Image: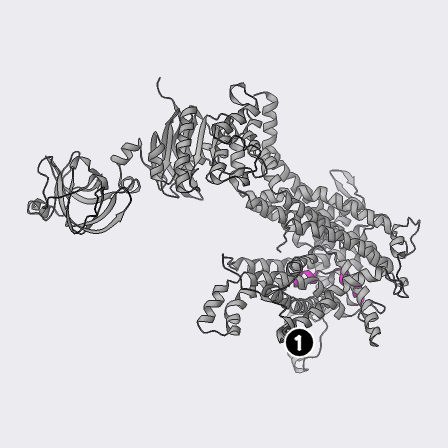
Amino acid sequence: MTADWNLSRAFQRVALPAAVAATIAVLVVVFYYPVGHVLAAAVRDGGRLTIKPIRAVLTDPFYTGVAHHLFVDPFGVPAGIADWIAAGFPSVRLGLFGFTAYQAALSTVASVLLGLPGAYVLARYEFRGRRTIRSLTLVPFVLPSILVAVGFRAMFSRRGFANDLLGVGGLGPIELLGTLQIIVIAHAFYNAPLVTRLVATAWEGVDRRQVESARSLGASRFRAFLDVVLPALLPAILTGAVLTFVFTLMSFPIVLTLGGLDLATVEVWIYARVQSLALQEAATLATLETFLSLSFIYVYLRFENRQVTTRGAGQSLSRERLSIGWRTLVDPRRLAIAGYAVVVAVVIVGPLVSLLVESVTDPSGQFTTAYYEFLLARQSSGAVGTVRPLPAVINSLVFGAGTLLLAIPMGTVVAIVATRGGRGSRLAEAILTAPLAVSGIVVGIGLLLTFVFGTTVAGHRLVVIGPVAIVFAHAAAAYPFVTRNVAPALGGLDPRLREVARSLGATRLRALVEIELPLVAPALLAGAAFAFAISIGEFDSTVLLAEGVESYTMPVALERYVGTRSLGPNLGPATAMGTVLLAVTGLSFVVIDRLGGRWEP
Amino acid sequence: MVPVSDVALREVSVAFDDVPALEDVSLSIETGEFFTLVGPSGCGKTTTLRTIAGFETPDSGRVEIGGEDVAGVPPENRHVGIVFQNYALFPHMTVRENVAYGLRYRDPPDGKSTGERVTELLELLDMKGMGDREPEELSGGQQQRVALARALAPGPDVLLLDEPLSALDARLRERLRVVIREIQQELDITTIYVTHDQSEALAISDRVAVIADGHLEQVGPPEAIYREPATRFVAEFVGDNNLLDGVVVSTDPPRVSLDPGGGLAEATTTAHGSGTTIPVDGVSDTNREVTLSIRPESLSIVEDGSSRLGGSNGPITLSATVETVEFMGDAYRVHCEWQGRELLVKTDADEPPSGTVTLSFDPESATFLEAP
């Protein structure tokens, strides 16, 4: 063996540990350092530790509502509750945090109510397009929430599609924008498919022999459902509810564009604070919000660990045909399903169709391509405010490509660490997956406070321009999706493939590159498509980091369009750009679906 | 030439999460030997193989290949070929690419080109013309041949086979094991074969090691393992067997009582037919409990009736009752009852025996084991 040969072997043996170290280093830069900075800003005052900023938030009735008494005068709380009961339960002030939790709770109830019938239909009925609808329940994971907001505006605004339809019947108009209802419905649009997906999977996992045993032991159809099926569904329903609650607690673009500051949630208010440069207050709020959401996720994970997943080789319950000829029209259950389909059409299909319709309809209702022409026009100063559409489209694609460059290697390395086991891998996995639990706006503020404003490292002042910071933030948000797809595929590979390769002379790295990675290529591609979709749709941190029109992305431009009051009811450019965004994410979705991509929360 | 020990384990112990999988195993396998590790599942035989290949690290002890300690040598530098039960063919490569894979890292032996070497091996394994197939297009037996060709292509020093035939049906298994044995002899390659099938182990090995619970029970040629099992475990695991507990009643001449009561007092009165004493070699202490092992084929059914106690060295006869008879094609397996114990007899009689029969065996064919 030559010296070169030995050197190359030595390199190969350190390559994997080096890749892990590099990934951790990148995470420190794009995630831990910035987020740590936010947390530090909340508890530091001129270099000294202090609880003042957190205290200030907690004791401010604006933030904590009636709960501020807990922090101001904890001993007076029992008496206060007694007074409140004596006064006959008058309505209380919720405060910003209270309102945020309140809307999240309402949204959770709405999502579960809207999602459960869907699970029932998908699990128990056979009909044309069932599989397609089932895979479409994955769409919310790749659909940018700002797009949902634009779709809802297109559907429900005064001149929206819904009012157009109502107008035909001589009804309306209705005004839903700026109300709590529209926010809750939009959240249901987003999260009901998640509930449907989780519960349908659980329902399909019920072994029909269990139900048949119960029936033959004397249980009625309904009784068997209560005793056998429902207990199997409850964990999935609860999982869906908890996830929906956490997601809607941190919801940002939907509330921002459909509710505005009047209905602000914590995230929206943090954004408003950053806009008015009240950075410490924003950091404090972000810290409290992160603490809250992490607590919920912790409780959820504890709960999830206790669940026993029984996925035997059992046979699923058989599906009924949905269509049974003319009797379909008189069967009460099928009529109820038809009613449900109408609700789904309005709430879920409606906004997306309105988006498409409005993008080619001018205010007088005539067909037009003006909005798409506007997207392509290289105007020196945009017709709408100063937002130029074409650079936003290009930026989104460039940032998406940059995100892939970071997220694919990072996500793959994390997947390897997670599946290889061994000492320290669990710790590494925890460090590597923590970014999942932190909202984009917190990462955004962190990057803003550190690299964008400039930070001093070893005597050198380091400043990173907005676009780079945006790619950092996108990579931190996107790489877990690569991991979630690649890790199960790697874990599912027969370890003996790797062992055979090694006994034939391949180093660990060569075996990985030549045998394992080619075999998980579809999962890697699905993960990449996910990552790209996440980057394309990312709004929370991008809106903070985009320094000006030059680094706007499609979602940020969309928000600017719908947020410009002077624009009035004309949504044209927004719906046109929204359609482009929908097409790009739709393409990602097709790639993900074709390659069997997965995202189990 | 003095046989060289090609692979050696010196007091090797391996544990997984503090559960011992191998305890103080010492083995020495000679160059060109076909050595088989046999034992029930979970006994540690696969762990032994994986430790030799470098996929497990011993907690203590040494592994030597070609006389050198291989501690710290990664699997890719050990120059062993391995074949797994599920073949583990690379699904994204053709047959030819699979076989050529190891030649990316090692030059083919005898100065051949990669192409020549691959063709040579495909021919050796009767897979000529299959080179461009995908693994999934092949039958199980064909896949196993490709796996074998792939392991052999770089000319490894040692061939490791981990239950290579277990996934195949019985007939194919018997055919392929002959193929493996022929190729091993043709290439004169040191081979370590792992199986749970004791008949397979006996059929193709130069030597067999029986493993149970992480330690060696017995190592020896197949004939010795079968005829002179060293422990009760080996006697029960390898082949069918009748195990009868008894007590040493005298050492000069050596005699063992099979009296069901086991007590010495009754044993001395066995002359009246309530028990049987058997003259044996090699039992030293009186009163010691021992187990007698008699193979079913060592027992024969004789015409003449009564129980006869072994006087000197003549055959011993027992009067037994036939309970169940299984027809095996070439023989009958007869389950008899003798003094409350079950005895299995193999006979090639034309008619199935029934009722009361007399069983006869030569005391020379019985082996004594320490009682558990």
Residue B87: image x %, image y %? Answer: 49, 38
Residue B278, placed above or below residue A306: above
Number of other residues with Cα within 10 Å of mark 1, as a class: few under 14, some 14 to 19, many 20 or more: some
Chain hosting mark 1: A
Taking depth in this image into account, of B294 and A400 the one nearest to the observer is B294
B11 horizontally vs B259: left or right: right
Q: Amino acid at mark 1?
A: Gly
Which color mode does the image show? one colour
Residue B205: % across, % down: 35, 31
Q: Which residues are magenta?
A: A243-262
Image location of residue A105, percent across then percent down: 67, 68
The residue lying at 71 percent from left, 67 percent from top is A344
Would you name the residue on which mark 1 appears? A80
Residue B244 highlighted magenta (yes or no) = no
Residue A441, quarter of the rendered image: bottom right
Is residue A256 in the magenta section? yes
Helix, strand or loop at label 1? It is: helix
Q: Name the residue nearer the viewer: A304 or B230.
A: B230
Task: Pick the quarter of the image with the N terminus of chain A.
Answer: top right
Looking at the image, residue B246 sits to the left or right of residue B60; the answer is: left
Q: Main secondary structure of the magenta part?
A: helix
Q: Residue at x 54, y 57 (%)?
A: A305
Q: Is residue B17 above or below residue B70?
A: below
Looking at the rendering, in which quadrant would you find the C terminus of chain A? bottom right
